[in-house]
């Protein structure tokens, strides 16, 4: 009953069974209203009055504080960005690449990140190595795979903490240790993480993880509004990371307006005017999750639900889950073993109010559960998938 | 009376006399409501359903179409960005700089753009030249100044169409011709325009102007929501402009998800997830302006009102307008000749409900009028400025 009340805060959950948290989270009504109120506040006391400008700066700061607190990081390490991809680009373009340097990329990364890495390679004559992480879903050791693929000129390893396609959680702390302890390189090996799936779903302490760059978004597992994400940059690598896209939000100016340096913290990578009310929506969404439970409690609930979904899917004759053991997060990917088109099933499910998605690599269907998913939604999904075959047969 | 009704569409105008359009425009109530409805629509039919994703792509397209139409450009030349500064950065980072190349920068540019140019200079060993455009406000020929400062290695000229500090409109078509016809260079001389002040206030035909890059924002003179701007890239320079920050929105992918190239048009410079409802707010705001009159009609009204403001300010004993003839756009900058602090006057005016701003270079106060500013607001402002001296004396 408590859960039902909690779910009522998310209008999107009212009329459908939602399994696309890895694509986008449902926005709480309170977040939308807080955003609306912020727009009204700006018009009432401004826009562009000194009082509104002071208020907006304070809102930005509070948003960085809320994010930092959830990530186990200090506020100085947080940059606000438009999305996770911009965060990845800031890290990628911030390194003083030399021709012949190498980037090690996992084989499970998002096409947008792959394309960004390829453009870096082209511009700076950097080599890109790929390593077979996908194959470690059910056996093998991803840390060993990374270790085997480091080379003396490797300067950056790019991977996801929680793989968007297979749902595997990588042992990030071990991987970071292997990279930072790699002695065959004359330069430090940095680790850039695409955290699109891990932020808001895994309990995190970035300070302990030791990761160098951790790029994330507010609009997936945190259920904030689309258009606001961020980047964590480890304090020790801040100074050696060069700002690329530059604007008034990142710089210090002297009295005559002349730029004289970067802001001392993660704000140096921020550029210019943004949709500031998005930060208010995100804070409101994070507060709603915190009212339910700590990130550890929410994570355990996600794991229980994804195990249930994984079990029920595994019991279906015509389904094979990619993972042979229960997932350690909210993404459950599976294939149809009867040759039926994944696209077709997902389209048919969407018509019935079940939102899932297909993926290309590997060719599969992905269903996500959040801490507030209900077992009954999962049961209905299983039934709808079974029914689709009945329909096909008839 | 018609004007009074028109003004009622902008809640921010109800409780103050607004003269900060160069900082941010007042958001129409209809735009805010359209944005709110878009958020509700996304939650109802999605988020992240195939139907919502199709709808969002169509919304983005319609936003590019509306922008292109107002700019006298084809939709293929338009990139949506978070703000004007990102647009400038896309152009700056898109050129294949060689050590020794030169950028010519006007001396009236925004600190954020100056800092971006300086970072390009540092990264690529490019030289930056500055030219004295500010001094041409009342005499001299800005085109001649540009022409005199071109050098054989100059590859880019960076300037504003409408100067944010002095309010001068530069003869952009002539300047572009001079740059494009400069024969002492082995490489073409491109022109990048910071159009923060010109878009939404000047009638524009970018195709005729011939400019290469024109970066703008929706939240100033167009009165859209903050966080959405754009970049025009002339069709002929699209292919030679390299995308820098790269993500899924800019790339083509093959069936397996592998990136295989750029989108064929301005979308190639777009990165990833944005606050899509902002585009709906912007279109709604543009439609409201169009209901009032064409961009030519609106511009003429702006000029009439700024001439009136300029005249009334010029009649004040203790005020000197920077321009010695009526401004050709909506920005009127002035100084106090009694040594009174500009900051202090602006603060005092804000308390009385008059929103203006100070600038550092030159040290002045800026008052902006839009087509819907009323002569009575101007009269009240003049009275408030006069009264401030009475208060000081007493």
Image (spheres, coloured by chain):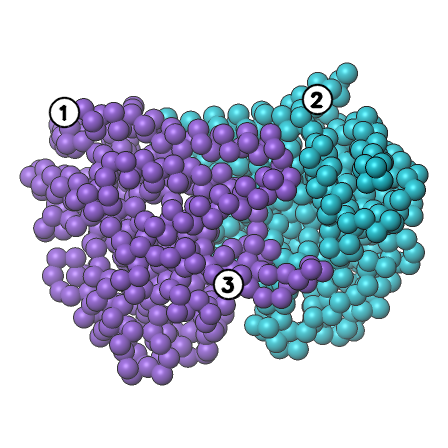
Chain colours: A cyan, B purple
Q: Report x, y in % for residue A218.
A: 62, 40
Chain bearing mark 2: A
Spatial distance from mark 1 to mark 2, Cα to Cα?
Answer: 61 Å
Residue visible at 73% across and 51% down? A359
Q: Which residue is mark 1?
A: B394
Classed neighbour count for the residue bearing mark 3: other residues with Cα under 10 Å, few (<14), some (14–19), many (≥20): few
Classed neighbour count for the residue bearing mark 1: other residues with Cα under 10 Å, few (<14), some (14–19), many (≥20): few
Q: Secondary structure at mark 2?
A: helix
Classed neighbour count for the residue bearing mark 2: other residues with Cα under 10 Å, few (<14), some (14–19), many (≥20): some
Image quadrant holding the N terminus of chain B, namely: top left
Residue A289, compared with residue B309, is above or below; it is above
Residue B115, compared with residue A207, is above or below; it is below
**Mark 3 touching mark 1, by CB under 8 A?**
no
Chain bearing mark 1: B
Q: Report x, y in % for residue B173.
A: 23, 64
Residue visible at 53% across and 27% down? A34
Residue visible at 82% across and 63% down? A132
Q: Which residue is mark 2?
A: A6
User: Depth check: A125 or A349 in front?
Assistant: A349
Label drawn at residue B264:
3
User: Do the dots labelled 3 and 1 sit on one chain?
Assistant: yes
């Amino acid at each position: 009953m408590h859960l039902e009340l909690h779910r009522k805060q998310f209008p999107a959950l009212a009329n459908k069974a939602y399994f696309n948290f890895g694509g986008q989270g449902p926005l709480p009504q309170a977040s939308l209203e807080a955003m609306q109120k912020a727009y009204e506040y700006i018009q009432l006391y401004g826009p562009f009055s000194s009082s509104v400008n002071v208020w907006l700066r304070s809102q930005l700061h509070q948003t960085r504080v809320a994010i930092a607190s959830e990530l186990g990081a200090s506020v100085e390490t947080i940059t606000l960005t438009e999305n996770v991809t911009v965060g990845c680009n800031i890290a990628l373009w911030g390194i003083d690449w030399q021709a012949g340097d190498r980037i090690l990329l996992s084989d499970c990364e998002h096409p947008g990140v792959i394309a960004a890495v390829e453009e870096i390679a082209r511009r700076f004559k950097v080599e890109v190595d790929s390593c077979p992480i996908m194959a470690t879903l059910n056996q093998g050791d991803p840390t060993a795979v990374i270790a085997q693929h480091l080379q003396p000129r490797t300067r950056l390893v790019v991977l996801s903490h929680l793989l968007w396609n297979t749902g595997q959680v990588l042992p990030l702390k071990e991987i970071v240790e292997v990279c930072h302890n790699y002695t065959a390189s004359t330069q430090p090996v940095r680790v850039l993480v695409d955290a699109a799936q891990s932020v808001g779903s895994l309990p995190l302490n970035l300070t302990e993880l030791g990761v160098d760059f951790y790029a994330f978004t507010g609009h997936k597992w945190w259920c904030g509004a689309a258009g606001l994400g961020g980047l964590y940059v480890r304090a020790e690598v801040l100074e050696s990371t060069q700002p690329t896209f530059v604007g008034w939000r990142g710089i210090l100016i002297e009295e005559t307006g002349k730029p004289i340096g970067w802001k001392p913290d993660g704000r140096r990578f921020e550029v210019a005017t943004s949709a500031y009310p998005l930060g208010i929506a995100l804070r409101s969404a994070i507060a709603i999750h915190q009212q339910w439970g700590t990130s550890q409690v929410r994570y355990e609930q996600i794991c229980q639900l994804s195990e249930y979904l994984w079990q029920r899917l595994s019991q279906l004759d015509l389904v094979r889950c990619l993972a042979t053991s229960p997932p350690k997060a909210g993404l459950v990917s599976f294939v149809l073993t009867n040759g039926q088109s994944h696209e077709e099933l997902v389209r048919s499910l969407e018509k019935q109010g079940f939102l899932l998605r297909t993926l290309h690599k590997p060719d599969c269907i992905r269903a996500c559960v959040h801490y507030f998913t209900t077992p009954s939604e999962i049961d209905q999904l299983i039934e709808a998938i079974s029914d689709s075959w009945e329909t096909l047969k008839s």
